[in-house]
Image (cartoon, helix red, strand yellow):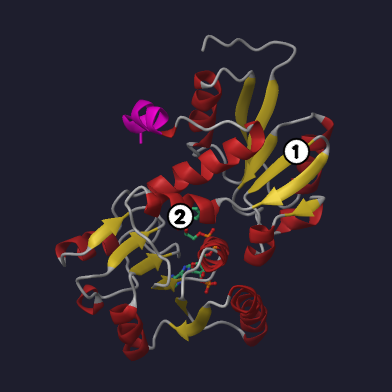
C-alpha cells in the first residue's frame, strides 16, 4: 500500500470540464493503493477543443485508460479505435481502455446502475421502468437495461426540435430492435400517460439535471403521481437527497440516489483497466466521511 511514484508508475485520468470537483481521483487513487497497483489517477480540464489531443496522449503516454464526463462523452466516439456494444447502443462513452495502443471506447454507466440495483436485490428482468430525460446517462441506462432483459421502458422528456427528436427516435428504435424491449418516447407534459406508466413501473428514474444546482429546488414529478410500490431513483448524487427523493420518501416510496451508481461505474472502469476488482466497500468507508 505504501506505493511511491517511480519510473514505472502508470497513469489513468478523468477528461472533463469541469473536472476539479470530481470524486473519481480519490476513488481510483485509493483503489490503486489498496490493490498495490503502481498507478496514479489525475483529473484534467479537457473540453471539446482539446479532447482529440488529450485522447492521443492516452496512446502516446501508454496510459491505462481514462474516464470521460461532460462535455466529452459523445465527441470522444470519433477518436477511439473500437466501440463496445453498449457504447454503440448508448451513443456515448464514459471510459476508454488502452489495449496496447488500441483504444476501446466503452460505457460503464449502465453497469454501475445495474450493480446499484443488484446490491439492493432489485431485479428488472421482465419489468417496466419510467425514465425522465433522454441525455447521455439516460441512453446508457436504456441500452444496458434493455440488453439485460427489462421488458418495457417509458421515456419522458420535454418537447424537442423535430431533427433532434428524429435522431433520438432512431437510436431508441435500434435498441428496441436489437433487444426486443418495448420503448416509448413521451412528452413530459402528458400527465395522464405518465400516471398510467408509473402505475405499471417498478422504477422511476430521474436522468435529468433537475434537482441539482442550479435547479436544486425543482422536481419534474408531483409526488401525488407516485404509487407506493414505485422505487424512485435519482441519478443525481449531489445533493444526496433531491427534492424528488425527499417528496417520494415522504410519500412512502423506497428511494435511491446516484452515489452507488457513481461508485460502481468507476469500479467497472477500474476492472477494465487493471483486470482487478476495486475494493468498493473499503473505499466507500474511507471516503464516506467526505462525501
Ligand atoms: P445530458 O446528456 O446533458 O442530459 C440531460 C437531460 O436532462 C436531457 O434529457 C435534458 O433534456 C434534461 N433536462 C435538463 N434540464 C431540464 C429541465 N429543466 N427540464 C426537463 N428536462 C431537463 O446529461 P447526462 O450526462 O445524461 O446527466 C443527466 C443527470 O444524470 C445529471 O444530473 C448527472 O449528474 C446524472 N448522472 C449521474 C451519474 C451517476 O453515476 N450517478 C452518471 C451520469 C450522469 P433536453 O434534451 O430537452 O435538454
Image vertical order of residue 174 relative to residue 283, above or below = below
Image depth: mark 2 or mark 1 in front: 2
Residue hosting label 2: 114
How many numbered discs?
A: 2
Per the image, label 2 sits on a secondary structure element best described as: helix
Per the image, label 1 sits on a secondary structure element best described as: strand
Going 47% across and 79% down the picture, which residue do you hit? 158
Give how far across and how far down residue 216 sits, in percent. 34, 58
- Relative horizontal placement of residue 224, taking residue 217 as reference (left or right): left
Going 79% across and 50% down the picture, which residue do you hit? 80
Residue hosting label 1: 98
From where the camera sits, is residue 45 visible? no
Residue 178 image-quadrant placement: bottom right
Q: Which residues are magenta?
A: 281-291
Q: Residues within 10 Å of mark 1 (few under 14, many from 20)?
A: many
From where the camera sits, is residue 99 visible? yes
Residue 180 image-quadrant placement: bottom right
Image vertical order of residue 170 relative to residue 121, above or below = below
Measure the C-alpha gap from mark 2 to mark 1.
24 Å
In terms of depth relative to the viewer, which is nearer, 77 or 122?
122
Going 35% across and 61% down the picture, which residue do you hit? 233
Residue 162 painted magenta:
no
Q: Earlier in the sequence, mark 2 or mark 1?
A: 1
Q: Which is the main secondary structure of the residues drawn in magenta?
A: helix
Residue 287 painted magenta:
yes
| Mark 2 and mark 1 residues within 8 Å of each other at the beta carbon | no
The quarter of the picture where the C terminus appears is top left
Give how far across and how far down residue 240 sits, in percent. 31, 48
Image vertical order of residue 15 relative to residue 179, above or below = above
Amino acid at each position: 500500500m505504501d506505493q511511491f511514484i517511480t519510473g514505472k508508475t502508470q497513469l489513468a485520468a478523468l477528461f472533463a470540464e469541469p473536472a476539479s470537483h470530481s470524486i473519481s481521483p480519490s476513488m481510483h487513487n485509493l483503489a490503486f493503493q489498496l490493490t498495490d497497483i503502481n498507478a496514479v489517477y489525475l483529473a484534467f480540464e479537457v473540453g471539446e477543443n482539446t479532447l482529440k489531443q488529450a485522447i492521443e496522449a492516452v496512446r502516446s503516454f501508454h496510459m491505462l485508460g481514462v474516464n470521460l464526463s461532460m462535455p466529452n462523452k459523445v465527441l470522444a466516439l470519433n477518436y477511439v479505435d473500437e466501440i463496445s456494444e453498449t457504447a454503440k447502443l448508448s451513443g456515448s462513452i464514459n471510459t476508454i481502455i488502452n489495449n496496447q495502443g488500441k483504444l476501446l471506447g466503452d460505457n460503464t454507466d449502465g453497469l454501475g446502475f445495474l450493480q446499484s440495483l443488484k446490491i439492493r436485490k432489485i431485479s428488472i428482468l421482465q419489468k417496466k421502468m419510467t425514465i425522465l430525460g433522454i441525455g447521455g446517462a439516460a441512453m446508457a441506462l436504456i441500452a444496458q437495461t434493455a440488453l439485460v432483459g427489462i421488458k418495457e421502458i417509458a421515456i419522458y422528456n420535454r418537447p424537442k426540435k423535430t431533427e433532434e427528436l428524429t435522431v433520438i427516435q432512431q437510436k431508441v428504435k435500434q435498441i428496441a430492435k436489437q433487444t426486443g424491449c418495448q420503448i416509448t418516447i413521451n412528452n413530459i407534459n402528458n400527465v395522464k400517460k405518465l400516471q398510467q406508466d408509473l402505475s405499471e413501473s417498478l422504477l422511476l428514474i430521474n436522468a435529468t439535471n433537475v434537482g441539482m444546482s442550479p435547479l436544486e429546488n425543482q422536481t419534474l414529478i408531483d409526488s401525488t403521481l407516485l404509487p407506493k410500490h414505485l422505487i424512485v431513483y435519482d441519478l443525481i448524487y449531489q445533493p444526496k437527497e433531491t427534492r424528488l427523493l425527499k417528496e417520494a420518501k415522504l410519500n412512502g416510496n423506497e428511494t435511491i440516489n446516484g452515489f452507488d451508481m457513481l461508485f460502481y461505474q468507476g469500479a467497472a472502469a477500474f476492472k477494465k483497466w487493471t483486470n482487478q476488482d476495486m475494493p468498493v466497500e473499503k473505499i466507500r468507508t474511507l471516503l464516506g466521511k467526505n462525501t
